[in-house]
Image (spheres, rainbow, N blue to C red):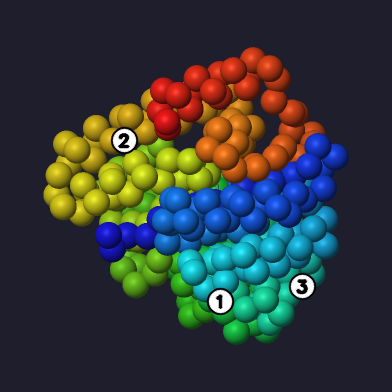
């Protein structure tokens, strides 16, 4: 398999919202030992990062690096609309923990101008000896980058690619065509196959925590030129993803991991705890798709 598969790492939380270290280590191990993913995307949306305090973010980066070591590729998402926090986290993960690649979400909420966005990225990488992957997720941030915006960001040689969580396949094709040497990692699991056909370098997603086997089989079928098989797997995957989305995304992935014996814990408030109905449905999803 030449294309890479990364799980967007979940964080296990205790009922009171503190980090469940044992559970978080178990999620890391499950991804390495059972899912055999190529890497982990740490501190992203799936990690519930944007609801956390700086010290908690640091602790999670530390736990993951300690558990994973150099077994898989690690990408630390350090982006924040507090640029000072983003720089502090970048410095911490690279210099104190030894992460080699960082990522940063586009700064959101204030409708920053493009020159401000470019300044943000150049500042984050300026003082650290690491490469950066732009995290573009317009549906959650409201920030859409154009092809020319990407071209300007990519002028910085330390900015090596993009985690592209977007359904705009025209822009994806234009990016692939214009920047053959930049890494494009696709972030919308339910649309993996069309993204593979446009030449992405790999994928990062939440559902790979529980569905990596299918994703890898799909990528292998695609690389072998067996498009019908790849499509069949995507159909099956999307039956699973539809069921997960219909029941509550992160809560359900955590419940599914629990069915697999992983202490995935709770989501963080204000995300709600799973109801008895969600638990029942998650067990049904597990039995139908993952057992
Ligand atoms: C991350 O930042 O943690 C993720 O990589 C985000 C990732 O793109 C996921 N997006 C969200 O959770 C908003 C997808 O894996 C997504 O969960 C999946 O495609 C189901 O819709």
Query: In the picture provided, is 246 more to the left or to the right than 88?
Result: left
* As drawn, 278 above or below 168: above
**Callout 2 secondary element:** helix
Q: Which residue is mark 1?
A: 100
Q: Residue at x 53, y 27 (%)?
A: 245
Q: Find out whether the residues at labels 2 and 1 contact each other: C-beta distance under 8 Å.
A: no
> Whole-percent x and y of residue 126?
65, 81
Query: In the picture provided, is 189 more to the left or to the right than 249?
Result: left
For label 3, the crowd category at 10 Å Cα-Cα, with few meaning under 14, some 14 to 19 and many 20 or more, is: some
Q: Residue at x 68, y 17 (%)?
A: 276
Answer with the quarter of the image where residue 211 lies: top left
> Whole-percent x and y of residue 279?
62, 22
Q: Which residue is mark 3?
A: 88
Q: Give the mark nearest the N terminus, 2 or 1.
A: 1
> Whole-percent x and y of residue 42?
61, 58
Q: Give the mark nearest the N terminus, 1 or 3.
A: 3
């Amino acid at each position: 398999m030449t294309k890479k598969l990364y799980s967007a790492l979940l964080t296990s939380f205790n009922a009171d919202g503190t980090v469940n270290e044992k559970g978080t280590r178990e999620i890391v191990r499950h991804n390495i030992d059972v899912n055999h993913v190529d890497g982990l995307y740490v501190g992203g949306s799936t990690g519930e990062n944007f609801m956390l305090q700086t010290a908690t973010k640091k602790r999670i980066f530390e736990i993951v690096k300690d558990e994973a070591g150099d077994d898989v590729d690690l990408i630390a998402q350090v982006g924040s609309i507090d640029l000072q926090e983003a720089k502090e986290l970048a410095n911490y993960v690279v210099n104190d923990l030894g992460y080699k690649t960082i990522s940063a979400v586009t700064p959101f909420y204030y409708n920053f101008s493009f020159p401000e966005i470019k300044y943000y990225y150049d500042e984050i990488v300026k003082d650290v000896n690491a490469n950066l992957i732009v995290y573009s997720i317009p549906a959650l941030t409201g920030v859409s980058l154009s092809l020319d915006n990407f071209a300007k960001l990519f002028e910085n040689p330390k900015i090596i690619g993009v985690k592209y969580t977007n359904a705009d396949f025209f822009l994806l094709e234009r990016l692939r065509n214009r920047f053959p040497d930049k890494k494009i990692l696709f972030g919308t699991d339910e649309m993996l196959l069309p993204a593979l056909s446009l030449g992405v370098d790999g994928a990062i997603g939440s559902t790979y925590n529980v569905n990596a086997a299918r994703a890898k089989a799909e990528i292998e079928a695609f690389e072998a030129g067996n498009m019908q098989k790849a499509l069949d797997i995507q159909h099956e995957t999307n039956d699973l993803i539809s069921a997960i989305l219909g029941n509550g995304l992160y809560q359900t992935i955590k419940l599914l991991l629990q069915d697999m014996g992983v202490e995935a814990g709770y989501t963080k408030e204000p995300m709600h705890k799973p109801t008895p109905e969600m638990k029942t449905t998650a067990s049904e999803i597990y039995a139908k798709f993952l057992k």
